Image (cartoon, rainbow, N blue to C red):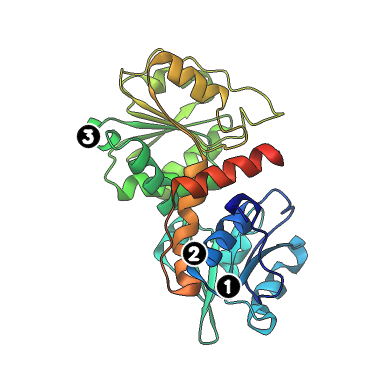
Amino acid sequence: MSAANIPGDTQKPIQAAVIGWPIKHSRSPLIHNTWLNQLGIAARYEKYAVDPADVTDFLRSMPERGLLGCNVTIPHKTIAYETADNCHPDAVAVGAANTIWFEGNKMCATNTDIYGFITHLDASAPQWRKADRPVTLLGAGGAARAIVYGFLQSGVTEIRIVNRTRAAADELTNIFGPKIRAVDWHEMQSALTDCGVLVNTTSLGMEGGPALEIDLSPMPDGSTVNDIVYVPLETPLLAAARARGLVAVDGLGMLLHQAVPSFERWFHVRPQVTPMLRDSVIADLKAHP
């Protein structure tokens, strides 16, 4: 059986899962079950659609369900953070959790999106650190908050937040301090001047959604453009970046790399993100868009 077809052996006990509302789109079972199969671990990973009203009860009942822990996706990340007994500094900084595990009877939480984003960016565009230029983020939601924290932890000295609602961008400046600068949406082009990395954290450009109207010409040669969207894998923004001669980084790697520390928390083995795993997920996205 190819990795792209691994659904999880139904004879193995469910020991980890991902919850969300909805959850049908999640590729996390494919990723984790591939690792479980490769590493010979007698467990499987499933996905559960959990109504927002039931999230706290589900999380607290995981040990009774035989679950070592779970991943958490939208819209449950804030509730998971607030429900946990102990929170890693990454979850505290972002105010949201995407990974839950237990230590004794204590429910613990962290946010691996930060690790996933920075690890993928470093692997795909390592030159971004050498440029020592400002970073521009489009959007000011939960994903942007995690990425801002990741950039600050990496030593970035100026981050420009461009958001359609200025108040949300201002909130990030209040949370993270003087290295963050809020920029009005209509002044987006000015935020690209001398910018070393541009990251789109909005839903603009997603398949079936509205387009992202942006002109990349102000960005310096050699700059990096990252779109955390991975459906489609090649968004119009990334296509425009390649046409401009910039370094384009897709959103799939963030999904793959954020899964690594989660898996390690539950199964005490650190899995590898390989080209074969990436190809398997891409094949699944094409087969089941």
Q: Secondary structure at mark 1?
A: strand
Residue 69 has which mark? Answer: 1
Dot 3: few (<14), some (14–19), or many (≥20) neighbours within 10 Å?
few
Q: Are the residues at dot 2 and dot 1 in contact (C-beta closer than 8 Å)?
A: yes
Q: Nearer the viewer, residue 97 or 251?
A: 251
Q: What is the three-letter code of the residue carrying label 2?
A: Ser
Q: CA distance from mark 2 to mark 1?
A: 9 Å
Q: How many badges with numbers are in the image? A: 3
Figure quadrant of residue 34: bottom right
| Residue furthest out toward the front | 1
Q: Earlier in the sequence, mark 3 or mark 1?
A: 1
Q: Nearer the viewer, residue 266 or 134?
A: 266
Where is mark 3, residue-wise? 130
Q: CA distance from mark 3 to mark 1?
A: 38 Å
Q: Quadrant of the C terminus?
A: top right
Q: What is the three-letter code of the residue carrying label 3?
A: Lys
Residue at the spot 33% in from the left edge and 46% down from the top edge = 152
Residue at the spot 40% in from the left edge and 44% down from the top edge = 120
Figure quadrant of residue 137: top left
Where is mark 2, residue-wise? 262
